[in-house]
Image (cartoon, rainbow, N blue to C red):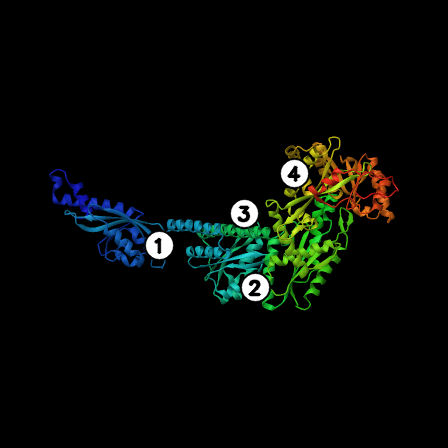
Amino acid sequence: MSDVHHAASAIGSGGSAGENEPGVAEARVRASEDRYRGIVEDQTDLICRFQADGRLTFVNEAYARYFGTTVEALVGTSFEPRVPEEDRARLQRALSSLGPHHPVTTVEHRVALDDGRIRWQQWAERVVLDEHEKIVEYQAVGRDVTEQRQAEALVGDQVRILESIAKGAPLTDTLAELCRVVEAHIPDGRCSIMLLDGATLRHGAAPSLPAEFVRGVDGTIVGPNGGSSGAAAFRSEQVIVTDIEHDPLWDRSRDLAAAHGLQACWATPIVASGDDRVRGTFAVYHFEPAAPTQEHEHLVGLAVQLASIAIEREEFEAQLSHQAHHDPLTGLPNRTLFLEFLMLALARARRYHTTVAVLFLDLDRFKLVNDSLGHDAGDELLVSLGERLRGVLRPGDTVARFGGDEFTVLCEDLSGAGARHQAVEVAERLLEVMKQPFLLEGEEQFLSASIGISLGATGEERADELLRDADSAMYRAKERGKGRWEVFDEAMRESAMARLDTENSLHRAIERGEFRLFFQPIISLTEARCVGAEALVRWQHPERGLVPPYEFINLAEETGMIVPMGEWVVNEACRQGARWKTERPRDEPFSVAVNLSGRQLAHPGLANQVRDALEQSGFDASLLCLEITESVLMEDAEATIVAIKALKALGVGLSIDDFGTGYSSLGYLKRFPVDFVKVDRSFVDGLGTEAEDSAIVVAVVSLGHALGLRVVAEGVETEQQLAELIALGCDDAQGFFFAPPQPASDLSELIARSRPWRPPGASVMKG
């Protein structure tokens, strides 16, 4: 007996004897069934009953309307053919799980409608049992959940695409996937995304449109006659064309669309989130005249937002990549990008048997521009210089900025025999264009540059090696007078290798104890005795022997090794000075002079290093004289004054070395708290023979005495030079005439001696 009959019996039981008569009871059962059927038919949910083989025994009106037919047409037929084959197994498993102890379950599956559409349904399935708890049939209540399913799928698609964007998937892949997502929800639609490039739209993605059509519309002009997409980008609003054949917007591309059966197209602009700029368009094409539904417009709106995010990320990454490979000031390629270009150029040179040239350009005395006009003016000059350099290069050549005032140029496709000449021609054009004045703050400024050239003739050279060689040649150009070019050659290579070997060994020299201190005596010309000594560092190399200073001092300065080396020199000089102090009478003080480099003077811990050296050795600070060259003093006069005042506070003496070779003014000289000035050896050389040198020495001695300073002459080698210095009233002197630099132990005898000096003009005894 069916549930309806069970229900009717229950309602009809329990009445009076008259009411239990057969006619009355049957009437009541019919009335109950009618009420039950009315309730079922009034439901908007789909209700049905079916046998185990899927044959329908009952459906309500809602079920029949859903499938576009009548109740009578459905009862007795099977619903299974409407369920896609891939969903039948899932439905069968759900029904098989039902029984007396598990009477109800839910299941979702798809159904195919007569018009070909596929819809999703959700069903609550239950069994109908007889009095023996045997399954009689199944009853189901269902509803359409297609929109819910689509919404869930769309959310999933959004998440998946956003994750893809976040992971840096290629833009074309992301845009193509967006098209496919929209097409899945608009089955008769074909999607296209185009990207704005200046005044035209370029193909971005169109996975389902004919390739010939895509090529035909690539480069669509943005404007009122640019089709749906061109007009949407032009107006910055959605454009709907329901009939391409008769719409004037498609005048230029109507035949192309017709050739591929496209009859309708609606396009939506892709707008940036921050500034409302149009970045592209999202278009949906149809093969029949059609307009978008509200649901479709909403769907494309979501796709446009995702496309905008993907495009903006691509632009942001491109911007980051540009910043990582270009100089922010001039916009020129930086070192990283230049090396990439150079490696590619070398690969092409190997393939085509051509030559590559690298030019390394460094401005001469650019620091003066920054110091005199300020860094803003210096930056303006560098930007102008970059533009000038680009303007005189050959097509295909590359100019880059490495930072500061360093620029590089890459020249490709040079012919083997004439490669050197071609590279030199480029260098001369660069030097020539720099001769034209630069206008800064209304005034003309003139610059020069030194250029080094290296050639990659085989293509087997490494990019960093070519760059290094060009750099070496540039330094050679500076050494030979600046404002010129030099080509790297084998002699430079050998010099560079020796320099590299020296630099590597220099880093180990201190820890291996390879440095030695030599001392050159300083003679008082008035007291005729040795009153001090200048400490000079020497390098006792384990393989090369005693390395002269000119081979490693400048290198130590460039690499920064001069700072730890200088600290060692100060410590050793103080220790030796303390030993000499114990060997001499108390009334004969003996000073020790130590040279300070520019890097040492700029080191913030210099004063503390000197103080520690004095304290640890016990040497009297007044007997230590620190020598600083005139050029170093003037590099940053204000900062130098602060540094030497900190040293002066320790009680040490200070001396200006190589005086007369720099460019200091008397105003600055008066501000430096110095005690000595040293006449440079180049002026002492000409004493008595060169009138100009003699005049300079006279001026230095007079100026020094006028400022209350003691004057020391260096490089004395002849009796005539000594006699001239005595006659001029110079206080002290040093040079090979007295003794060359030598170890402290060899100097003890000279230090202990005192020689009587004859009056000026008489012969001088050599000490």
Label located before the other in sequence (4 or 2): 2
Label located before the other in sequence (1 or 2): 1
Q: Which mark is residue 119?
A: 1
Disc 2 to disc 3, how far (Cα)?
31 Å
Label located before the other in sequence (2 or 3): 2
Q: Is residue 597 visible?
A: no
Dot 1 and dot 3 residues touching (CB under 8 Å)? no
Q: Select label 1 or label 4 by which is in front.
A: 4
Identify the residue under disc 4: 571
Residue shown at the point (53%, 64%) measured from the top left? 215
In this picture, residue 488 sits left or right of residue 710:
left
In this picture, residue 114 sits left or right of residue 677:
left
Residue 316 percent across, percent down from the top left: 55, 50
Dot 4 and dot 3 residues touching (CB under 8 Å)? no
Label 4 environment density (alpha carbons within 10 Å; few <14, some 14–19, many ≥20): some
Q: Amino acid at mark 2?
A: Arg
Identify the residue under disc 3: 273
